[in-house]
Image (cartoon, grey):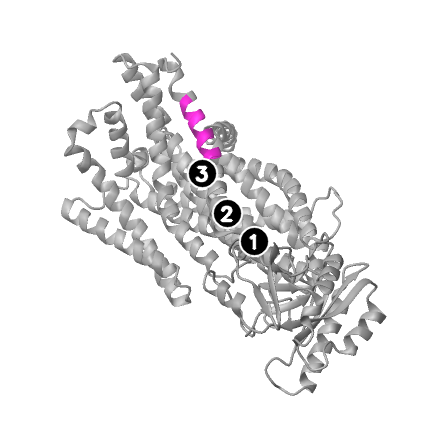
């Protein structure tokens, strides 16, 4: 008889758990969708770990797989915090219901088992959907990685059991940790504590006005100093700056939240203007009890914005360097006496199929008039270049042909300038004539295609190059020699490495004097290096940024949607008192906007100057166009607020639907 009763109770509890699980999935749709996306992201990145293609590509860069694993572990910790927060929040929301179960005779352990079962059902459903969606996301990441390394991508639907297993392990650790904490609470809490658990608030941390003002002023000062230290660049300063910024965020939100009620109490004319009274009451209730939560969310937003911005910056930096340094399929430069060694040319002739090639000199001018002009108007690194560099028009035309650029014309008595794009505007305004020996040449045109002008010593000029008629160069000093080639296929890594070995061997055999060195470069190698760097830095940074965004916005949205019942009662009362539906919409929108705007403002004030400082700290001419500092900041903010807006719109429409229609909000 006892076992029969226990069997009936178990079946009833199981049905109750399933019913509550379905209701929970509906009530916390944002959390459910976020868990699906979290599972999808983890599966996609785990898929890269177990991908044979990625393993082959990372053969030249052993850290790729390791860094993907480390990134996944960091994101698992972030998602673990999200799930722990959400389950604890659900426990708070449903504490009265669970307390009633104990009141009617269930044991604490049975209620804990019930809560565990329903959350496990929600997590299991989200995990299954996440694995399915993650397979599609993995194909996208796989295509991006293959494109980065210049490999052909072919769609192949496959399911990685290794990636799925690792994702399941991650989720098991996340959910078991979160549910274990909730189970411990449920097993030890009394009925009274459980029923009134949902009424607990954070509470105002600072009660006195003088202490509040002191903390507010000190936190603002710490925020300014911390931001400046983050921009200093040194590791110690960055660590101190991060600590100051954290102190600023917590101090700011604690003091600000405590000061909102005092601000409106001293200004009653503002409190009763328009819908301010309603908004004021909501702000008082929200900010007065959520200072710590808001500070944590703002801190995560700051980390997210900087991570995303650094990803954009590194991507633009490496692509810019690769485009300039890999302007030609193959390049060899030499400042050694005798020019480009025959050892290079013999190896190239035997191992690399060449369609077109040229050995040419780069000359040294009579003075540094153009270099001095540029240095006075723009950040310019002209190391190892004591005078302006010159090139004959015939060699210049041949190099443009090899690089695939259009033909240009040099009129008699003129000179051309080929420069990096960032110098174009100031060099277009250069009016004086250029003197070479007995020749006086007038300005012609400026061209800015990539031309291997980033080399420190033996490139085609450092940042710029003056193109003159060939007869002008008679009697000029050759500064160094160059060799470029257009190849039938990308230069293989083995061939490039062999040319580098020749360079190192020649250097060891020569006299160790300044400038007596060679330089070897290839487009294929530069693109491969850029792809590898992007894969090991940009991907993890974007991955981290997305995880932080999903976590923080989900917590904000769960908190906001949890107030739906309160808002419903509030607006129902206002409707009965005569407030129009249009006014209620405005009030709800103001509450919503202020709630979501507050934690996003400090990250923008901190992140923008930090990103701008990092972008301006690299060598000039690399971050231009869509990779300029303004573009990096613009792209970072656009992506940040775009993703933010998606969550905000979903949450607002859901809250508006649940609150306003039944009280005439559509009227």
Mark 2 element type: helix
Given residues 94 and 515, the one toward you in this image is 515
Element under disc 3 = helix
Quarter of the image where the C terminus is located: top left
Q: Which residue is mark 1?
A: 316
Q: Are marks 1 and 2 in contact (CB under 8 Å)?
A: yes
Mark 3 = which residue? 554
Label 2: few (<14), some or many (≥20) within 10 Å? some
Q: Position of residue 509 (x, y in %)?
A: 70, 86
Name which of mark 1 and mark 2 comes first in the sequence: 1
What's the residue at 44%, 38% (across, down)? 554
Q: Give, as a single range, the part of the protein colored magenta.
A: 644-656
In reply to whether residue 122 is colored magenta, the answer given is no
Judged by depth in the image, the label closer to the viewer, 3 or 1, is 1
- Residue 513 lies, in percent from the top left, at 60, 85
Task: Pinpoint residue 100: horizontal percent, then vertical percent.
Answer: 35, 29
Prevalent SS, magenta region: helix
Q: Which numbered tag is attached to residue 631?
A: 2
Q: Is residue 646 magenta?
A: yes
């Amino acid at each position: 008889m006892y076992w029969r009763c226990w069997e009936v109770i178990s079946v009833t509890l199981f049905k109750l758990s399933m019913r509550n699980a379905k209701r929970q999935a509906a009530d916390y749709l944002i959390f459910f969708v976020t868990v699906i996306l979290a599972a999808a992201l983890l599966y996609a990145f785990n898929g890269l770990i177990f991908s044979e293609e990625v393993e082959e590509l990372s053969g030249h860069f052993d850290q790729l797989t390791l860094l993907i694993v480390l990134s996944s572990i960091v994101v698992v910790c972030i998602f673990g915090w999200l799930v722990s927060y959400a389950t604890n929040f659900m426990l708070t929301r449903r504490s009265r219901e669970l307390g009633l179960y104990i009141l009617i005779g269930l044991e604490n352990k049975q209620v804990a088992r019930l809560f565990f079962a329903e959350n496990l059902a929600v997590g299991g459903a989200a995990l299954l959907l996440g694995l399915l969606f993650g397979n599609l996301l993995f194909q996208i990441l796989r295509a991006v990685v293959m494109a980065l390394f210049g490999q052909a991508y072919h769609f192949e639907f496959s399911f990685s059991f290794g990636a799925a297993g690792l994702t399941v392990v991650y989720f098991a650790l996340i959910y078991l940790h979160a549910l274990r904490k909730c189970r411990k609470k449920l097993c030890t809490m009394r009925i009274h504590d459980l029923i009134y658990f949902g009424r607990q608030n954070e509470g105002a941390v600072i009660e006195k006005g003088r202490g509040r003002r002191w903390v507010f002023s000190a936190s603002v000062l710490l925020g300014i100093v911390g931001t400046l230290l983050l921009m200093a660049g040194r590791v110690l300063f960055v660590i101190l700056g991060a600590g100051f910024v954290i102190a600023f965020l917590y101090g700011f939100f604690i003091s600000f939240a405590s000061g909102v009620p005092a601000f409106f109490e001293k200004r009653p004319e503002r409190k009763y203007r328009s819908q301010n009274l309603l908004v004021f009451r909501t702000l008082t209730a929200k900010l007065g009890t959520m200072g710590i939560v808001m500070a944590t969310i703002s801190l995560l937003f700051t980390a997210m914005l900087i991570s995303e911005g650094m990803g954009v910056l590194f991507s633009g930096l490496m692509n810019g360097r690769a485009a300039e340094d890999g302007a030609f399929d193959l390049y060899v430069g030499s400042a050694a006496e005798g020019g480009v060694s025959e050892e290079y040319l013999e190896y190239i002739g035997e191992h690399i199929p060449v369609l077109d090639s040229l050995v040419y000199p780069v000359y040294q001018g009579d003075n540094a008039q153009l270099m001095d002009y540029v240095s006075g108007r723009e950040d310019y690194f002209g190391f190892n270049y004591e005078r302006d560099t010159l090139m004959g028009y015939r060699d210049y035309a041949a190099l443009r042909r090899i690089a695939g650029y259009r033909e240009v014309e040099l009129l008699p008595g003129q000179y051309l300038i080929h420069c990096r794009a960032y110098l174009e505007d100031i060099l277009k305004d250069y009016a004086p004539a250029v003197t070479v020996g007995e020749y006086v040449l007038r300005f012609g045109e400026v061209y800015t295609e990539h031309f291997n002008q980033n080399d420190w010593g033996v490139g085609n000029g450092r940042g710029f190059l003056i193109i003159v008629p060939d007869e002008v160069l008679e009697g000029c000093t050759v500064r160094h020699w160059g060799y470029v080639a257009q190849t039938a296929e990308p230069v293989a890594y083995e061939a490039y490495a062999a040319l580098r070995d020749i360079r190192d061997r020649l250097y060891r055999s020569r006299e160790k004097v300044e400038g007596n060195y060679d330089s070897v470069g290839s487009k294929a190698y530069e693109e491969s290096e850029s792809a590898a760097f992007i894969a090991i830095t940009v991907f993890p940074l974007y991955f981290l940024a997305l995880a932080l965004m999903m976590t923080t916005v989900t917590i904000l949205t769960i908190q906001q949607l949890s107030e739906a019942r309160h808002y419903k009662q509030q607006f129902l009362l206002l409707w009965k008192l005569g407030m129009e539906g249009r006014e209620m919409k405005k009030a709800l929108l103001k509450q919503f906007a202020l709630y979501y705007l507050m934690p996003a403002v400090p990250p923008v004030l901190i992140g923008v100057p930090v990103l701008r400082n990092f972008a301006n700290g690299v060598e000039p001419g690399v971050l231009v166009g869509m990779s300029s500092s303004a573009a990096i900041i613009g792209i970072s903010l656009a992506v940040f607020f775009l993703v933010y807006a998606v969550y905000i719109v979903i949450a607002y429409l859901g809250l508006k639907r649940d609150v306003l229609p039944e009280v005439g909000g559509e009227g």
